[in-house]
Image (spheres, rainbow, N blue to C red):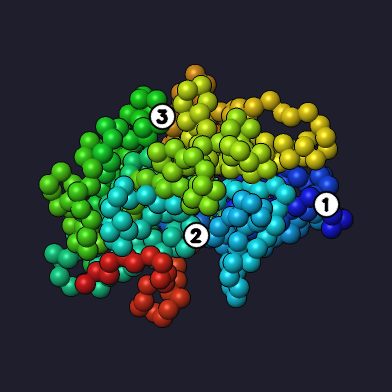
Amino acid sequence: MLDSAPRVVIVGGRFGGLAAAKALRNTDVRVVLVDRQNHHLFQPLLYQVATSVLSPGQIASPIRNILRRQLNTTVILGEAVGVDLDRRCVFVDSADREGVALNYDYLVLATGASHSYFGHDEFARFAPGLKSLADAVSIRNHVLRAFEQAEAEEDPKRHRDLLTFVLVGAGPTGVEMAGALAILVRATLRAEFRRVDPASARIVLVDMAPRVLGSFAESLSAAAQARLEHLGVEVRLGHAVDLIDADGVIVAGERIASKTVVWTAGVAPSPAGKWLKAPTDRAGRVRVQPDLSVPGHPEIFVIGDTASLDQDGRPLAGVAQVAMQQGRYAGRTIHRRISGKLAQPPFRYFDKGTMAVVGKGFAVLQTGRLRLSGFLAWLAWAAVHLEFLGQSSLRVSVFVQWVWLYVTGQRGSRLIVNHQGPLRHDSPSIVFHEPS
Ligand SMILES: Cc1cc2nc3c(=O)[nH]c(=O)nc-3n(C[C@H](O)[C@H](O)[C@H](O)COP(=O)(O)OP(=O)(O)OC[C@H]3O[C@@H](n4cnc5c(N)ncnc54)[C@H](O)[C@@H]3O)c2cc1C
């Protein structure tokens, strides 16, 4: 690769960024992909790490390993902290250097989203969200530790708080997590404790919306709610959480005492809009042109959860398929410009459908006019998720684990891993309230 070849800097190496990089595989460019994590993470299965079904290594792979055969691409572990539009460079902090300028001819920002606590950032301390592997492992540690503490606790009055799990947000993540937790406590852990009955654990799913899975058809929301209730999950809808503190949550004036609250509600965009001083939507996502470029900057593309684009009068959802299709589109646009070819037609998202799984052997699926719930939908869910895992080794390992879980009820990864000593919590970024 010639040093004079145009340089494409991609920030973010998950669904959007990776798809953009792969689309430039055969283009005469130097690609530099920057991510603050060294791994690509399959977020749709993150809840399975948090509930001990899978281990972190089964849903994530090193980005440089995925791109090892793509010789025009260099992977840098670092955090982008700003963009100089005039000098055309991105500033990157790494382990031992700050503000290193990376020049670009084309820039693709695919920096995703983070948690939004709807103006209540004070909740974050008591109700961590689920976005990264560290979040998932920390939640797993906390859930498993709650059972250990309850077993060691001689005062039965304290068992109730320890074994009450509250999930705030009844979108796909909250619903999937609640279903998986219900199976964990009622099936896997059931026979292993002597002083407490894990099956008596209370799982409460709270949302201010009138139904679970609000982005799905009403019939599927109803099916998912019925399934959750069948699994013993308490579904509390129509009220926002008023307060989250060390003792639990207050919903509609009622306190639910709990030592484990997980936030699965809002998302906040990355600061890319601020770096670019570009127009954003109300949620802070960068408003992009129909070709995914930033107004006034045809050399900069913003894609995936960081971008805001309407299609048929409605904003595109923050889902993996949108990010992947936009990544491919941005990569192809850069390829065509460099090769002197005509521009592509405006980006158009092809919706392949959405799914959510609710416990064992049950999912809801909607695609086009098809609405399906039950075992068949679950089989489709399993097949699609295996296909999108990305690497054959992960597919085999997750498939075997799922079959094992289905047949025996036993989970793959029920270890409490402490990185700071036997009785300390492991992730400094997530502060769960310690049961006192
Ligand atoms: C728990 C959970 C479950 C989900 N389940 C589903 C599902 O079932 N189906 C579905 O379609 N979608 C699902 N989603 C949504 C889906 O994961 C996102 O829409 C998708 O990941 C967006 O891809 P992206 O590439 O835009 O951003 P992301 O996947 O968020 O990737 C952003 C990348 O940018 C990196 N990054 C961020 N800021 C910086 C920076 N400053 N410098 C360097 N690197 C940076 C991050 O480390 C990350 O690797 C789920 C999301 C979550 C959190």
Q: Which mark is residue 133?
A: 2
Residue nearest the viewer, comparing 41 with 187: 41
Determine crowd level at label 1: few under 14, some 14-19, many 20+ residues with C-alpha closer than 10 A: some
Residue nearest the viewer, comparing 363 with 262: 262
Pointer 3 residue = 216
Determine whether, in the image, residue 216 is placed left or right of residue 74. left
Expressed as whole percent of the image width and height from the top left, the position of residue 163 reads: 25, 59
Examine the rendering and report whether any part of residue 207 can be seen: yes
Mark 2 is on which residue type?
Answer: Leu
Expressed as whole percent of the image width and height from the top left, the position of residue 36 reads: 57, 62
Q: Quadrant of the C terminus?
A: bottom left
Residue 49 to residue 432: above or below: above
Residue 349 to residue 257: above or below: above
Pointer 1 residue = 5
Q: Which mark is residue 209?
A: none
Mark 3 is on which residue type?
Answer: Phe
Determine whether, in the image, residue 28 is placed left or right of residue 52. right
Determine crowd level at label 2: few under 14, some 14-19, many 20+ residues with C-alpha closer than 10 A: many
